């Protein structure tokens, strides 16, 4: 076991990725045939999930290699960045091969495909590039830097990141533990300070009062806020972001002019209300009703029904609420419309609002193990009046709510990739600090090979999560619709990686990792929510990623 391994190069990683791509191409082609171009995914769910995840790993490996190569071209980064990218890509390729191997018979490609894609010399290269000695060397280097995130960026983005980092460390981090442990609500100062810094308007176009900094600036902001606290800051801009995208895609000009400047200024906090007690993943089956009514001489709709898991519904001034405007359930998604439902903000774990016309809205926060600070509510609406002008898209928006909401979720997923990276980053830093200080059997635990290996692998995985998320952000700047599947892949992988990294970091803390006193215990429970919302993992894999890869 050499302590000075030959570190893999980006060229090594490219060769390994090319081999993985050839195996994957064969697997995808067969999966398309078996699923009749995605129409019969439900008859082959396990297989479809496998190839969807493998394709996500291949994409992340490509983005990781390209990110490091781009940094080298621009004179940024260093040898460790390249070695981490190459080893991270090799690890993803090894995982892809292991994932597809049990399915080669079901796919009908057999062992031959494996042998052909990975001849002996490439198998040897793969073993060398993902060898433990490589990850131990990376781990020593990362721990020495205390896990700091030094991912190279251009000057403008570097400024964005460092200013948000400074803000989050000074203003958010000192309160994060208290908010988590007391299940408190996000303090108003967080909102006013973030609003003053323009964080709520990062992706609102300038003509509507925003700053239009682009999706990568928004991701870097989210990442740094989430590093301080996923729940009390990192998730605050997700909801306005989702509504912004829905309004941009389907709102009337009047609606954009009315709502977007208020969102950008942070004057309006938003809740997203899609899920119902009986309706989760099957969004097209939403039952909450919005029926036409005239109240106090104003035309509009009365909304009736329960909603669940509406995060920040108490403090929110508006809920972006999906409701059925066509009672004919056979219309499925085409019977749904999206409303901007106004309400008074409340700062408690429950609330009740009433309207002069008799409408009532009540909410009760469901206690959760983590992700505390915004509170997620079960909400009951009874004859709650919403003016017709609050139907997104006005009359033209009738029946389009499902599609607008799904477009909004694509942006939400990108954000969640950023949230996952920020949380994983925090866990990596805490782990490095702990293993440098903790002495057992007469040595700091960082001196043990297994610790170094775990730290090195965490850093390489986090680099992969970041690379695919940043790539999705840039792709979203180009074409939001086309980039939606990549944003879903970024969310899928980054969230899994955040769960894995927080758990590894917790283990490296030993018993103290289970103590509330150490932030790692908060990170671990917070991370668990990431693969659940904005499309629970199995649904994201099957109905978004696999459908996109296998469909015509
Ligand atoms: C803390 C928190 C905050 C949230 N915030 C919001 C919010 O602000 N707004 C909002 O609207 N929602 C929110 N949600 C809800 C979240 O989006 C849903 O929980 C999620 O979409 C999954 O729905 P569900 O919980 O009903 O699970 P279900 O849809 O019941 O799925 C449960 C499991 O069943 C399996 N399953 C279901 N269907 C299939 C299938 N076709 N094929 C294979 N397996 C299947 C999967 O394993 C899945 O994981 C939040 C949830 C949490 C926990």
Image: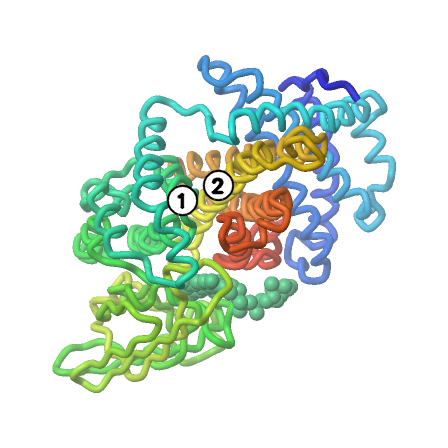
Q: Position of residue 293 (x, y in %)?
A: 23, 82
Residue nearer the viewer, 418 or 432? 432
Q: Which residue is label 2 attached to?
A: 426
- Outermost residue on the left side: it is 297
Q: Where 117 sits versus 521, above or below?
A: above
Residue nearer the viewer, 147 or 220? 147
Q: CA distance from mark 1 to mark 2?
A: 7 Å
Q: Is residue 334 left or right of residue 261?
A: right
Element on which disc 2 rests:
helix
Q: Are marks 1 and 2 in contact (CB under 8 Å)?
A: yes
Local packing at callout 2 (Cα closer than 10 Å; few below 14, some 14-19, many 20+) is many
Tag on residue 228? 1
Q: Residue at x 45, y 46 (%)?
A: 419
Q: Position of residue 352 (x, y in %)?
A: 28, 79
Q: Residue at x 38, y 56 (%)?
A: 178
Give the color scheme: rainbow, by chain, secondary structure or one colour: rainbow
Q: Position of residue 523 (x, y in %)?
A: 51, 50
Q: Where 499 sits versus 466, above or below?
A: below
Sequence-first disc among 1 and 2: 1
Q: Is residue 28 left or right of residue 400?
A: right
| Residue 25 seen from this side | no
Q: Position of residue 163 (x, y in %)?
A: 30, 33
Q: Where 7 sits versus 479, above or below?
A: above
Tag on residue 180? none
Q: Residue at x 67, y 37 (%)?
A: 440
**Which of the 4 image quadrants contains residue 543?**
bottom right
């Amino acid at each position: 076991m050499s302590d000075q391994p030959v570190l893999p190069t980006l060229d090594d990683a490219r060769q390994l990725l090319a081999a993985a791509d050839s195996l994957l191409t064969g697997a995808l082609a067969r999966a398309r045939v078996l699923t009749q171009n995605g129409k019969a995914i439900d008859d082959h769910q396990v297989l479809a999930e496998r190839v969807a995840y493998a394709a996500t790993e291949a994409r992340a490996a490509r983005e990781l290699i390209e990110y490091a190569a781009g940094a080298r071209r621009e004179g940024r980064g260093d040898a460790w960045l390249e070695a981490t990218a190459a080893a991270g890509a090799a690890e993803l390729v090894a995982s892809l091969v292991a994932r597809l191997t049990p399915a080669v018979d079901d796919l009908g490609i057999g062992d031959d495909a494996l042998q052909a894609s990975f001849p002996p010399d490439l198998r040897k290269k793969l073993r060398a590039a993902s060898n433990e000695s490589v990850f131990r060397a990376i781990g020593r280097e990362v721990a020495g830097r205390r896990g700091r995130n030094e991912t190279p960026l251009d000057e403008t983005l570097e400024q964005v990141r460092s200013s948000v980092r400074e803000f989050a460390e000074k203003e958010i981090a000192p309160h994060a533990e208290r908010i988590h442990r007391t299940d408190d609500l996000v303090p108003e100062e967080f909102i006013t300070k973030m609003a003053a810094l323009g964080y709520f308007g990062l992706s609102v176009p300038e003509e509507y009062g925003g700053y239009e900094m682009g999706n990568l600036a928004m991701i870097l902001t989210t990442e740094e806020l989430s590093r301080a606290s996923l729940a009390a800051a990192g998730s605050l801009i997700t909801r306005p972001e989702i509504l912004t995208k829905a309004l941009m895609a389907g709102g009337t000009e009047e609606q954009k002019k009315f709502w977007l400047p208020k969102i950008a200024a942070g004057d309006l906090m938003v809740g997203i209300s899609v899920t119902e007690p009986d309706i989760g993943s099957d969004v097209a089956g939403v039952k909450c009703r919005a029926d036409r009514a005239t109240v106090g001489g104003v035309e509009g709709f009365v909304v009736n029904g329960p909603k669940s898991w509406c995060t920040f519904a108490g403090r929110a001034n508006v809920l972006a609420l999906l409701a059925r405007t066509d009672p004919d359930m056979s219309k499925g998604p085409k019977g749904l419309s999206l409303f901007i439902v106004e309400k008074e903000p409340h700062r408690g774990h429950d609330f009740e609002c009433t309207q002069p016309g008799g409408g009532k809205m009540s909410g009760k926060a469901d206690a959760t193990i983590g992700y505390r600070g915004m509170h997620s509510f079960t909400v009951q609406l009874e004859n709650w009046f919403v003016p017709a002008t609050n139907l997104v898209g006005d009359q033209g928006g009738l029946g389009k709510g499902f599609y607008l909401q799904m477009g909004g979720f694509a942006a939400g997923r990108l954000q969640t990739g950023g949230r996952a990276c920020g949380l994983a980053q925090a866990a990596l830093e805490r782990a490095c600090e702990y293993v440098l200080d903790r002495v057992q059997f007469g040595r700091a635990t960082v001196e043990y090979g297994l610790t170094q290996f775990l730290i090195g692998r965490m850093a390489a995985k986090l680099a992969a999560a970041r690379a695919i998320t940043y790539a999705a952000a840039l792709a979203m700047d180009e074409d939001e619709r086309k980039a939606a599947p990549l944003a879903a892949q970024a969310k899928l992988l980054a969230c899994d990686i955040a769960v894995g990294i927080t758990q590894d970091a917790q283990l490296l803390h030993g018993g103290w990792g289970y103590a509330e006193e150490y932030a790692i215990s908060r990170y671990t429970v917070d991370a668990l929510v990431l693969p659940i919302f904005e499309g629970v993992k199995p649904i994201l894999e099957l109905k978004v990623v696999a459908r996109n890869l296998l469909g015509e």
